[in-house]
């Protein structure tokens, strides 16, 4: 009998830059010319069937004109495409087109695209580099930052995936003008969540400048983008793999994700999150974590952004309560919620935990009230 120890200690630098600006397509190509991903010259541009015509095709053409090999890989838009079958189809298409380990993925689109493309990159050829070119406020605020990639299953959202950091993120504010207003509104939910959990001054800024956001005032949009990046970075930097602190990014998501799934994705992610944040502050108020006045401020800001704050009548309440148990924060079959501490901070509980157990009775009460 013998024993052989395989020592595989490693230090990995997953640092990357986030560039915020307007019309960054040519900047992306120039970065690649200057060695952003080393000597790679083959690029799979992954996008959806809406963003293809708006942004991705232009990027693909610029890459080709610059002497790179580039090909579009397009799937149907929407959360229903963020599943294992779509991942398989993208992978098979890349393989059929001759893509192997000597390539890089460029994800062009919103959160569904960046989540799915980042997951593909993490497993294709056992891992290839990728870039995110975020074209929605939601992706800029959430999905393109932090390295969480995943697909949904019939049971719940985002339970199958991995942590995979991009080589760089481009936030193209100019692309937001191509968004339907409903999509822009949806993106504001993650922005409001960031303010609720980490920065009361940013919360007040949003109260004062919501109309300016819809008016596309450049200095306001840039400030919103910068604050979203800063707040999320400060969390991810301390807890990249979601061991404890990073759970606070799930503020409002226990109810929000469940509603999104039970609605059959009739509700966009941000719309469901608006309802989830409302449920969280109402329940938090009953526990003494947030005052009634601050609850009113949060709900008022959500409404000012155009986000829903009540559960639609078509949502089956019993199915919704059952779906809460598929949340990734559940431990030993017990529901766990993240809570605000007033506005601009979060509650910390015993043993450095940022989520606490909530009885089904309490969750049911809030859901029935809404």
Image (spheres, rainbow, N blue to C red):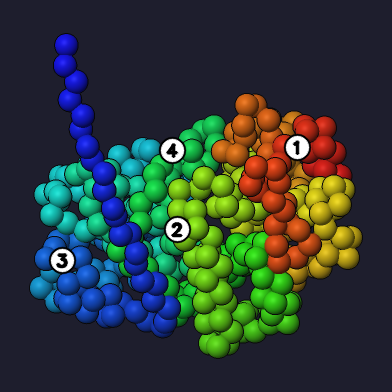
- Please tell me which of labels 3 and 1 falls first in the chain: 3
Q: Can residue 111 be seen in this view?
A: no
Residue beneath label 1, please? 358
- The Cα–Cα distance between marks 3 and 1, rounded to whole angstroms, is 49 Å
Residue beneath label 3, please? 38
- Please tell me which of labels 4 and 1 falls first in the chain: 4
Query: Which secondary structure, mark 2?
Result: loop
Question: Which residue is depicted at the point 22% across and 79% down?
Answer: 30
- Please tell me which of labels 1 and 2 falls first in the chain: 2
Residues tagged 4 and 2 counted as in contact (Cβ below 8 A): no
- The Cα–Cα distance between marks 4 and 2, rounded to whole angstroms, is 16 Å
Residue 310 spot, x, y in % from top left: 78, 52
Residues tagged 4 and 1 counted as in contact (Cβ below 8 A): no
Give the numbered dot on residue 146: 2
Instruction: Tell me if 302 is positioned left or right of 362 in this view.
Output: left
Residue beneath label 4, please? 160
Vertical arrangement, residue 65 with respect to residue 97, above or below: below
Instruction: Tell me if 225 is positioned left or right of 331 in this view.
Output: left
Question: Which residue is depicted at the point 62% across and 34% down?
Answer: 330
- The Cα–Cα distance between marks 1 and 2, rounded to whole angstroms, is 27 Å
Residue 296 spot, x, y in % from top left: 85, 64
């Amino acid at each position: 009998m013998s024993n052989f120890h395989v020592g595989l200690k490693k230090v990995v630098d997953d640092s990357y830059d986030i560039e915020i600006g307007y019309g960054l397509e040519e900047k992306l190509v120039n970065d690649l010319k200057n060695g952003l991903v080393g000597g790679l010259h083959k690029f799979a541009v992954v996008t959806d069937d809406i963003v293809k015509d708006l942004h991705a095709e232009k990027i693909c053409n610029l890459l080709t004109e610059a002497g790179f090999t580039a090909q579009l890989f397009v799937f149907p838009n929407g959360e229903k495409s963020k599943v294992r079958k779509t991942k398989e189809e993208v992978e098979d298409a890349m393989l059929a087109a001759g893509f192997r380990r000597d390539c890089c993925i460029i994800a062009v689109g919103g959160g569904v695209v960046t989540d799915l493309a980042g997951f593909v990159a993490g497993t294709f050829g056992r891992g290839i580099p990728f870039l995110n070119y975020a074209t929605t406020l939601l992706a800029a605020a959430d999905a393109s930052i932090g390295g969480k990639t995943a697909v949904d299953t019939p049971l719940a959202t985002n339970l199958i995936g991995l942590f995979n950091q991009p080589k760089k993120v481009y936030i193209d504010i100019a692309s937001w003008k191509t968004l339907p207003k409903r999509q822009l509104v949806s993106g504001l939910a993650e922005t409001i969540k960031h303010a609720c959990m980490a920065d009361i001054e940013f919360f007040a800024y949003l109260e004062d400048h919501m109309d300016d956001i819809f008016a596309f005032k450049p200095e306001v949009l840039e400030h919103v983008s910068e604050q979203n990046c800063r707040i999320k970075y400060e969390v991810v930097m301390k807890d990249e793999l979601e061991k404890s602190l990073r759970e606070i990014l799930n503020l409002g998501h226990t109810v929000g994700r469940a509603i999104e799934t039970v609605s059959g994705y009739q509700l966009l992610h941000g719309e469901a999150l608006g309802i989830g944040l409302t449920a969280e502050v109402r329940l938090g108020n009953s526990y003494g974590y947030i005052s009634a006045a601050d609850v009113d401020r949060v709900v008022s800001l959500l409404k000012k952004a155009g986000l829903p704050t009540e559960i639609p009548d078509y949502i089956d309440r019993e199915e919704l309560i059952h779906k809460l148990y598929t949340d990734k924060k559940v431990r030993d079959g017990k529901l766990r919620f993240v809570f605000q501490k007033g506005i601009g901070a979060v509650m910390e509980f015993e043993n450095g935990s940022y989520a606490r157990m909530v009885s089904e009775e309490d969750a049911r009460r809030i859901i029935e009230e809404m």
